Amino acid sequence: MNKYKRNERIAAITQILVNTPNKVFTLTCFTELFAASKSTISEDLVIVKDIFEKQKLGKIETITGAAGGVKYIPIISLEKKAEIIENLRMELSKESRRIPGGFIYLADILYNPNYVQSLGAIFAEEFIHASIDYVVTVETKGIPLALKTAFMLNVPLVVFRNTFKADDGPTLSIHYASGSDGRLKTMYAPKNSMGKGSNVLIIDDFMRAGGTIQGMQSLVKELESHVVGIGVLFEEAMSEKKLVDDYFSIFTIDPSKSKEHVTIQSHIL
Amino acid sequence: MNKYKRNERIAAITQILVNTPNKVFTLTCFTELFAASKSTISEDLVIVKDIFEKQKLGKIETITGAAGGVKYIPIISLEKKAEIIENLRMELSKESRRIPGGFIYLADILYNPNYVQSLGAIFAEEFIHASIDYVVTVETKGIPLALKTAFMLNVPLVVFRNTFKADDGPTLSIHYASGSDGRLKTMYAPKNSMGKGSNVLIIDDFMRAGGTIQGMQSLVKELESHVVGIGVLFEEAMSEKKLVDDYFSIFTIDPSKSKEHVTIQSHIL
């Protein structure tokens, strides 16, 4: 008697899947919700899957077996990626963003929920097959980006800090040389912030030499886990070798060019 | 020839609306996407709207007039809210979260993408009619919560900081007395972080006396904007009067109770 029409089931299923990316929902969850048979729900899912593919709205993945079910993977189409990258490139090129010292003002972009939503999806797509257990960043500006990536991968976020407060509980800490000025800084992590042997994805907004990323790598090691991926939004072009080898970056900024022509290149398309 | 079935349109429309809460999509956007008439799309939207209401998946709102269209408002059902609140209350009551000095370890909750997604939706619902232009927080732990609230309200986030870096550009700064220890601290905001006369919603993770919130209020005033709402996740029960009057909090923690029975109460249900 509480029967739903196919249209209705499809709208509800889509909302539920899209609302929590990468979370596996069992078929039973939907058969109970709609008092429908497994075969009916399976047919619904095929329709959602096909139209998502056709319209490039992401991927509906079916997992078979005992722990089986269905999940939504937010994949951004190449066209959409190109559009985001071009918008960002134009934003970044604005004269009004130049700050003395060769810096570019980025805060509003790094805190813009729509930009970080798309950029988080790009990072998540890059590392989706790396069996990530935690996303890690260090305060402050990379937090939104790291949070969205963690949300898209459906894993917890851990934020390392440069200060140590009373409500942090027991912490592990390391010293690291910040690449930009060579100064020795401290980085703290709550001692129980991740299970031992976890796979960690490091996400940060900006990388110059890579000293801060190296610091995060050391601290992850102290937590007895391993870094399996590194994603940065902006890296600065440098003549010297970076301190970090294997990373995925979305933009390279080259401030060595004349001030009027800071080069901003993306290499993800 | 590029015609879509109703099922397919409904799945795609749902994905698009749910993916960007509070963003108004014009009917034209959908008529073009599916080569369908306005009346067809309107019928699709009624189906989505009705099932969202029936299944308590949020609200589909239609805006009439020239700037008209349709948007998705993520509203969490009372049952779901009760479930989230109860989960959190149980989490917070765990013995292992106690830190010397009467603190409770909260970082993992404040950085958990699923918790902040739900809590951000609760804040957004509370302030949806306040014509918010910006969500503001101060680093660090409130950032995920504030970001999700901003995302749900479809407005930018501004993060005030306690330090001032070379890449922040010109900043405004104020001194404020941190309520917890009475110490004088500094808070910085990028000078052009918001348009003058903006409506600001302050979101923070924790409030003791309210000194930090007061600091944010002063800084918003210096930016020639006004605070129209304050949302905090946890407030501490105090015998003295708080420094801030009108705020919305989700939990009250009372550490004055014996150590074995810290009281954690929610007042949103």
Image: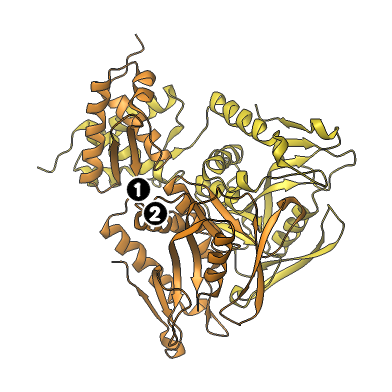
Chain colours: A yellow, B orange
Q: Secondary structure at mark 1?
A: loop
Quarter of the image with the C terminus of chain B is bottom left
Q: Farthest residue in the top direction?
A: B1
B185 lies above or below A91 = below
Q: Position of residue A126 (x, y in %)?
A: 61, 37
Q: Does the image show residue B109?
A: no
Q: Does the image show residue B193?
A: yes
* Foreground: disc 1 or disc 2: 2
Mark 1 or 2 closer to N-term? Answer: 1
For residue A83, side relative to residue B11 (left or right): right
Q: Position of residue A24 (x, y in %)?
A: 41, 45
* In the foreground, B21 or B108: B21
Quarter of the image with the N terminus of chain B is top left
Q: Position of residue B220 (x, y in %)?
A: 55, 60
The residue that disc 1 covers is B74
Amino acid type at mark 2: Ala
Quadrant position of residue A185: bottom right
Chain letter for the residue marked with disc 1 in the picture: B
Disc 1 vs disc 2: Cβ atoms closer than 8 Å? yes
Residue A46's mark?
none
For residue A47, side relative to residue A137 (left or right): left
Other residues around mark 1 within 10 Å, as few (<14) / some (14–19) / many (≥20):
many
Counting the numbered discs, the total is 2
Chain letter for the residue marked with disc 2 in the picture: B
The residue that disc 2 covers is B124
Quadrant position of residue B49: top left
Q: Secondary structure at mark 2?
A: helix
